[in-house]
Amino acid sequence: QIQLVESGGGLVQAGGSLRLSCAASGSFSSINGMNWYRQAPGREREFVATIIEDGTTNYADSVKGRFTISRDNAKNTVHLKMNSLKPEDTAVYYCNGNVLLRTGGWTLYWGQGTQVTVSS
């Protein structure tokens, strides 16, 4: 069974930093894009950052210059380093990954989410 599990969320003061991690486990061939999304209360889930297998990254404008996404392909892990956090960054953060199954074909898997709360 393929799973993505996030960790690293918590409570932090405005201006502080957190580092989220997401580890994929199970039997698969590879993972192409690995992404972070977030969902604040009463709002739709929104894109935060993406990184593909060759290391190419892209960010939402709201986090550019503050967040950094990285990955360790050998460990099938993606990280999100969040600096200069603002109260509006408060949300449940989800990772997902586009997984190449051993049987062929690509499937998108989501983690269960980790709460990030930024106090003012």
Image (cartoon, rainbow, N blue to C red):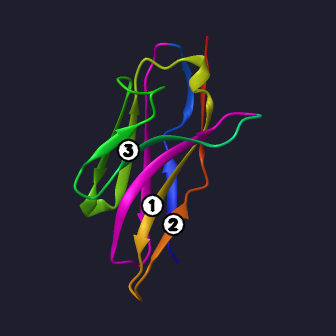
Residue at the extreme right: 42
Q: Main secondary structure of the magenta part?
A: strand
- Disc on res. 108: 2
- Disc on res. 77: none
Give the spatial CA distance, label 1 vs label 2: 6 Å
Question: Judging from the image, what secondary structure is the residue with disc 1 in?
Answer: strand
Q: Amino acid at mark 3?
A: His
Q: Position of residue 24 (x, y in %)?
A: 43, 63
Residue at the extreme bottom: 103
Quadrant housing the C terminus: top right
Q: Are marks 1 and 3 in contact (CB under 8 Å)?
A: no
Q: Which residues are magenta?
A: 15-41
Residue bearing the label numbered 3: 79
Q: Amino acid at mark 2?
A: Leu
Magenta stretch: residue 19 in it? yes
- Disc on res. 97: 1
The residue carrying pointer 3 sits among few (fewer than 14), some (14 to 19) or many (20 or more) residues within 10 Å by Cα, namely many
Q: Are marks 1 and 2 in contact (CB under 8 Å)?
A: yes
The residue carrying pointer 2 sits among few (fewer than 14), some (14 to 19) or many (20 or more) residues within 10 Å by Cα, namely few
Q: Amino acid at mark 1?
A: Gly
N-term-proximal mark, 1 vs 2: 1
The residue shown at (44%, 27%) is 63
The residue shown at (60%, 18%) is 87
Q: Is residue 73 left or right of residue 102?
A: left
Tell me the quarter of the picture where residue 60 sits: top left
N-term-proximal mark, 1 vs 3: 3
Given residues 78 and 98, the one toward you in this image is: 98
Q: In the displayed structure, would residue 43 be above or below residue 118?
A: below
Given residues 44 and 38, the one toward you in this image is: 44
The residue carrying pointer 1 sits among few (fewer than 14), some (14 to 19) or many (20 or more) residues within 10 Å by Cα, namely many
Magenta stretch: residue 78 in it? no
